[in-house]
């Protein structure tokens, strides 16, 4: 059966037995559907006829009509929210989304954010291209610029949750002007590029929650690379720079690359000779885990040549070795400069010189030999013994003198 807005086609009727008819049926008519035409004004009667014919209880059983489709869902939404039009329904749904978002924001504010806080998001950060995710600052994307490599996994989780609540595409869709009913029903999204920064957030979370990828990124942290370029030189220290305040933070930054922890600090002006020697011994034998895989060049897209892949891998390997060698040389130069400018070295050398001179004076001819500690202890014991014997002798002498007098 085919139903149209104005016509209903019925199949040909089954053959009737001729014996039950009061007349002989005509058999020369063609067997084709007979159209029934309804006027436009009688569509309600048409739908009532269809309901009675095909939905009403039938002798062979019951038939159930199930309402489905997006139009029926919109009708239910209108009924549930007591809305009189689709525009009023859109306003109600938008207000409900804002209420839920505010509720989530209050819940997030009530929780302990572990010191993550809320960093500003400059326009340059929001316009990042997710295709260039390797060049972005993942800590800045998640709002962890003030923590960076010290951020714990729990802090990364909290920061990611905050960014998702703020920049999720559904959240942006709820804040935009409601689209027309036809677009709403068809599921068309007008803001196809609104999720670009959200993709950057997801990529930053993926990198920082993977220990290996995070270590590779920390090795070439853009903030640390800028600090490396601005390292103080010996000429700058000659212009009355504070030795300890300037170099202590530098060694603290490099200490995170050490395989051996804890790392001895630069110390202070009154550090002992043992502490100073331990510091320089550690940094001259510094064992670093820093690597440069993050800067590897990718194989050309669409290239299936094994030779291209081998060449790219070989090139990346040589570049990593070159950067590693330069990093070791740069750190060694920093330690050499620190040693040459350390004011404690001059003090320690002066103390060693005075000790040598005192030793020479003690061993000079004509000077009384210096007694050892053991000899001094023996002489002390001997003097105590002699004093005790003298005291006992005096007691005995006084006793006999008293007896003789009596």
Image: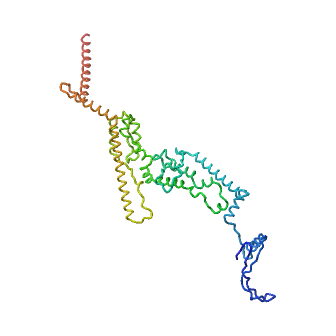
Where is residue 385 shown, x and y percent of the image?
25, 24
Q: Which residue lies at the image location 37% right of the left edge and 61% below the top edge?
A: 311
Where is residue 300 shown, x and y percent of the image?
43, 61
Extreme-right residue of the structure = 22
- 379, above or below 21, in the image: above
Where is residue 61 shown, x and y percent of the image?
72, 74
Q: Is residue 203 left or right of residue 331?
A: right
Query: How does the figure colour the protein chain or chains?
Result: rainbow
23 and 372: which is toward the camera? 23
Where is residue 258 shown, x and y percent of the image?
38, 47
**Quarter placement of the N terminus:** bottom right
The count of marks equals 0
Extreme-left residue of the structure = 365
- 360, above or below 220, in the image: above
**Quarter placement of the C terminus:** top left
Q: Which residue lies at the image location 27% right of the left edge and 31% below the top edge?
A: 353
65 and 168: which is toward the camera? 168
Q: Is residue 164 left or right of residue 396?
A: right
36 and 238: which is toward the camera? 238
Q: Which residue lies at the image location 69% right of the left edge and 56% below the top edge?
A: 89
- 405, above or below 370, in the image: above
Q: Which residue lies at the image location 81% right of the left edge and 88% below the top edge?
A: 23
């Amino acid at each position: 059966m085919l139903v149209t807005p104005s016509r209903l086609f019925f199949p040909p009727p089954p053959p009737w037995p001729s014996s039950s008819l009061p007349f002989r049926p005509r058999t020369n008519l063609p067997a084709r559907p007979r159209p029934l035409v309804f006027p436009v004004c009688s569509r309600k009667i048409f739908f009532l006829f269809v309901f009675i014919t095909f939905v009403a209880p039938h002798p062979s059983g019951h038939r159930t009509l199930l309402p489905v489709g997006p139009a029926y869902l919109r009708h239910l939404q209108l009924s549930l929210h007591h809305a009189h039009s689709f525009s009023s329904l859109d306003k109600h749904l938008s207000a409900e989304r804002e209420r839920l978002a505010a509720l989530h924001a209050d819940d997030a504010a009530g929780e302990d954010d572990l010191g993550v806080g809320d960093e500003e998001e400059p326009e340059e950060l929001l316009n990042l291209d997710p295709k260039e995710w390797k060049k972005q600052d993942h800590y800045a994307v998640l709002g962890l610029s003030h923590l960076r490599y010290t951020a714990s996994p729990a802090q990364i989780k909290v920061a990611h949750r905050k960014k998702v609540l703020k920049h999720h595409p559904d959240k942006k869709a709820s804040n935009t002007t409601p689209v027309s009913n036809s677009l709403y029903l068809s599921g068309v999204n007008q803001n196809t590029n609104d999720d670009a920064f959200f993709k950057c957030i997801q990529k930053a979370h993926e990198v920082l929650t993977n220990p290996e990828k995070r270590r590779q990124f920390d090795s070439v942290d853009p903030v640390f690379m800028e600090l490396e370029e601005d390292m103080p030189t010996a000429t700058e220290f000659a212009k009355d720079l504070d030795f300890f305040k300037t170099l202590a933070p530098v060694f603290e930054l490099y200490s995170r690359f050490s395989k051996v922890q804890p790392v001895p600090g630069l110390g202070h002006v009154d550090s002992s000779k043992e502490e100073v020697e331990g510091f320089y011994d550690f940094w001259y034998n510094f064992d670093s885990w820093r690597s440069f895989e993050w800067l590897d060049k990718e194989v050309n897209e669409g290239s299936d040549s094994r030779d291209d892949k081998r060449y790219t891998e070989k090139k990346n390997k040589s570049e990593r070795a070159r950067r590693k060698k330069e990093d070791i040389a740069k750190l060694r130069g920093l330690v050499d400069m620190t040693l040459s400018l350390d004011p404690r070295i001059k003090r320690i050398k002066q103390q060693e010189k005075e000790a040598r001179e005192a030793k020479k004076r003690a061993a000079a001819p004509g000077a009384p030999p210096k007694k050892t500690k053991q000899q001094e202890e023996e002489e002390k014991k001997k003097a105590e013994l002699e004093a005790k014997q003298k005291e006992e002798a005096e007691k005995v002498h006084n006793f006999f003198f008293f007896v003789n007098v009596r």
